[in-house]
Image (tube, helix red, strand yellow):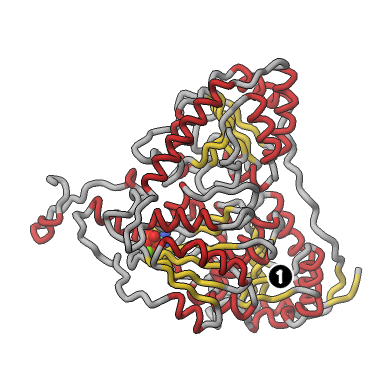
Amino acid sequence: MTLMTPSEALVEQLVAEGITNIFGIVGSAFMDALDLFPDAGIRFIPVAHEQAAAHAADGYARVTGKPQACIAQNGPGGANFVSAVTAAFWAHSPVVAITPETGSMGIGTGGFQELDQMPWFQKCTKYQVRVNRPERMAELTRRCFYEAKLHSGPTQLNIPRDYFYGDINTEIFPSRDVSYGSGTVEQIEKAADLLAKAKYPVILAGGGVSSSNAIEITTKLAEYITAPVVNTYLHNDSFPQNHELGVGPIGYCGSKAAMYTIQKADVVLALGTRLGPFGTLPQYDIDYWPRDATLIQVDIDATQLGLSKPVGLGILADAKQFAEQLLVAIKSADKDRKKNSARLDEIKKTKNEWAEELEGWSSSTSKLMHPRRFIKELTDAMPDGSIVATDIGNNSSICNAYLTFDGARQHISALSWGNCGFAYGAAMGAKMGAFDKPVFAVQGDGAYGISGLAEVMTSVRENIPIIAVVFNNGEWGAEKKNQIDFFDKRFVGCDLPTNPDYAQIARDMGAEGYKVEDYRDVKEIVNTAVKSGKPTVINAVIEGGENVLAEPFRRDAFKPAVRHLPKYKHLDMTSK
Ligand SMILES: Cc1ncc(C[n+]2csc(CCOP(=O)(O)OP(=O)(O)O)c2C)c(N)n1
Ligand SMILES: [Mg+2]
């Protein structure tokens, strides 16, 4: 036991957990601890809005595979974390949100910046704790890191501000590491038997394949049984599409090759995925989910097994450890397995057909850039190994068909939380986690206004050289598409007619800025931005509106508008 203050205990425990950077906004509530950060070797990275701090911790955690932290002033500062922590929750990303709160004697009295902060995070964290005595600061901090690892998700460390002060005797040591294991022998043998006997086995590689570094073993497994590999929605980095068995992502705006492939499966091995319901909805009018196939689901979160789809076999396991044992079991169950050349030819044909169709959609030479032409040029120009944070919007989603990766932890996406304003903050964190790699943040003009534009100041001030691409179509395009399809083009709140030149604003903030209006210039601008090593904003002026917008996000959830009152009768869509 060593004598220290609770502030010292917090900071020393953060150091023991390997924390070297924390994103946040300065606040009096935790200033006594903040004062120690520089000497502790922790860099405090101040942002423009706390949402970006939590997204940055998330992006940082996803790239490094280690829990990361963010910190905010009590009340309004912590409240600004909520949406971003929820994004981390659905992404199974270990973010420790440190939320100092009003003093312990003031809790519940309605003082300055006071509201009960625990309910905010109740449903979007895996664990939360209010430090109940200053003496427990190190212990409860350690617990938050352990639980973040254990459940691979966010936790909340809530600290009454007076508990930073005092004299305590405490111990500092790092939290334990976690291993989920490979599943039981019986489960592994059953899965091996199902896959060995399958007529058309398909592997559905989820985020867990990327985060457990299971791509190599998944490749070996896929090759042994000649099983095509499909990426789950917004996890384009879970298996390389340039492998002959990689067919790309299912889900919104994904790969038709993936959808036609999984449609044929009689056994699906869903590896490292919760099978989020949005990610398996029909797309391009292809109702691809193979309802009659036997589903083997493997995930580290037991609560997700069989939650959204009926499973034949649900296995609580680490994707990598399971896949390793499964390959051993299949090899012994099916010793003389031959490569299935006919299936490989069929996969090649399906991939080629989709590639040709996509190429056709992306070959416009019109003067005002077609979004697909721009996105094709952009993704072609991104160097190998780039990390890409993708936002939510029509153009960000169009990217799903174009983004390919050759390794894990490179596609950092908003996933099923689907919040506009994710990409820029997440990209800042991703860059801190992989400083030597090019990091892109791609987002629409609307989303960039939510959280992006102001954070360019952060990137400049803190020297975080990420490349932001703003799809400038002058509209909240994804929502406009709904009004086109379901409301007879009655546009309410969808136009952004007075967008500034984001490149010029970026330059005013001290970043590099490029306005691109011709698809032929895209490659050179991207190359220059990558080489410059400076925070950069690319203002991509693209066509918007009904001729170019991709299909709507939620065709499944709309009903024709019914209007009974005479004054609204002309808005009724049931007779149209
Ligand atoms: C925080 C948040 N607010 C609102 C929405 C609803 N929404 C989904 S997509 C979208 C439009 C995005 O527009 P933009 O960023 O300009 O991209 P575009 O669709 O034009 O490519 C909106 C408003 C959301 N997903 N998240
Ligand atoms: Mg837009």
Q: Nearer the viewer, residue 418 or 436?
A: 436
Q: Where in the figure is residue 528, as x and y percent of width and height? A: 56, 68
The residue labelled by disc 1 is 21
- Is label 1's Cβ within 8 Å of ligand 1? no
Quadrant of the image occupied by residue 426: bottom right
Label 1 residue SS: strand
Q: Residue at x 64, y 54 (%)?
A: 385
Query: Which residue appears at 50% of the width and 26% of the height?
Result: 346
Disc 1 marks which amino acid? Asn
- Residue 207 sits above or below residue 42 on the image: above
Left of 333 or right of it: where is 288? Answer: left
Front one among 550 and 8: 550
The image quadrant where one finds ligand 1 is: bottom left
Residue 210: x %, y % from top left: 64, 46
Circle 1 packing at 10 Å, graded few (<14), some (14-19), many (20+), is many
Relative to 444, say whether 146 is above or below: above
Name the residue rendered at 63%, 43% in the picture: 301
103 or 175: nearer the viewer = 175
Q: Is residue 334 above or below residue 91?
A: above
Is residue 114 something that shows in the picture? no
Q: Quadrant of the N terminus?
A: bottom right
Where is residue 256? Give x, y as percent.
43, 38
Instruction: Answer left or right for 513 relative to 237.
Output: left
Residue at x 79%, y 57% (from the top left corner): 175
The extreme right residue here reads 1
